[in-house]
Amino acid sequence: MTTDDDDARQHLTTKEGWRKFTFGQPATPKLPTPKQYAMLAEPIRRNYDEIRIDHHARLMVVATSTVRHTVTTGRRLVMLNRHAISARRGLIVSGPAGTGKTIATTQLGLAHELSDRAAHPGAHGRIPVLYVTVPPAATARMIAAEFARFLGLPVHSRLNTADIIESVVGVCTKVRTGLVIVDEVHNISLTTRQGAEVSDTLKYFSERIPATFIYAGIDIEHSTILSGTRGAQIAGRFTLIPTHPFPCNAEWTGLVRTMEDTLLLHRHKPGTLVALDHYLHERTGGMIGALSHQIRGAAIDAILTGDEEITQAGLEAVPLDVTASNQDRKKRKTNR
């Protein structure tokens, strides 16, 4: 049984949670033959089904073109910034919700972490990657506290924002942090004083911490973050990678095939989902997040019901997010 403290350490916004993420997922369980499965004792079968459900519940990472482009561009920036004293270049990953921004940036973080370990085998105490999210209605103190929380630094009420920032900068320099990922950047509004102070705090961190900064958020290029004097400074230093819904093309079919290959169902016929690729695109609007949710949800239902296969009816039984549902309705109206 896990405690609340144990659960808190699983989050990517703590160094313990990030470290667990970088050490990989559990091995994929093997699927026994139907005869072997039928011979399992009931308690063993229930336990095995729980293992399969847990397998399908995990968010699977697919190396899409966006993920590959983000990792390549980000790693190039890290190398270019290696000897920069100031004005380091950064990266913005921006697009609609559900288009894979967080997956792309965390895969970049994973690549940097593994590269750092390979370059410094046996080194202890290094924290190559720092990952934080911007809280809604954030203040400068709140964003500084998020940095401190990841590092495990105490944030007492008697500490002012400058004290927290100095502690964070000192630790990041000591532990050789080389990549800082700031997610949910769309929560910053430069039209408010608080938002402007948060932007200034992030800029100050980027100047003091010798690391490459990666921003991710919803439609950042159309927000206030890149407007005005502060926005112009960000726009002049950051490269933008936009994310979009996938068109119904060969890559989309490949995504469906990759996800189908991970299924652990006893009666599922390989190729069933690939044959439904156009339906899946219409239903999800080309959103990879919605596609993953639909397939994983249908797989869990198939185990719970004992059907052990995914059909179109099973896919339709999985409700999707509002954005994907609205796009599906629009397409159906257009095709009438």
Image (cartoon, rainbow, N blue to C red):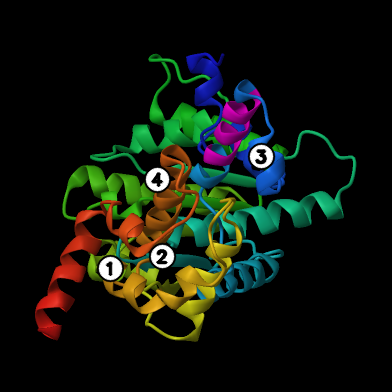
When the figure is inspected, residue 228 is found, relative to residue 102, above or below; the finding is below
Residue on which disc 4 sits? 201
**CB of mark 2 within 8 Å of CB of mark 3?**
no
Q: Where in the figure is residue 214, as x and y percent of width and height?
A: 50, 59
Residue on which disc 3 sits? 37
The residue at 16%/64% (across/down) is: 326
When the figure is inspected, residue 48 is found, relative to residue 132, above or below; the finding is above
Give the structural element (helix, strand or loop) at label 3: helix
Q: Nearer the viewer, mark 2 or mark 1?
A: 1
Residue on which disc 1 sits? 283
Q: Nearer the viewer, mark 2 or mark 4?
A: 2
Label 2 crowding class (10 Å Cα cut-off): few <14, some 14-19, many 20+? Answer: many
Residue 226 visible = no
Q: Does the magenta segment cover residue 50?
A: yes
Q: Does the magenta segment cover residue 283?
A: no
Residue type, mark 4 in image: Thr
Sequence-wise first label, 2 or 3: 3
Sequence-wise first label, 1 or 4: 4
**CB of mark 2 within 8 Å of CB of mark 1?**
no
Q: Horizontally, is 283 left or right of 322 in the view?
A: right
Q: Quadrant of the N terminus?
A: top right
**CB of mark 2 within 8 Å of CB of mark 4?**
no
Residue type, mark 2 in image: Ile
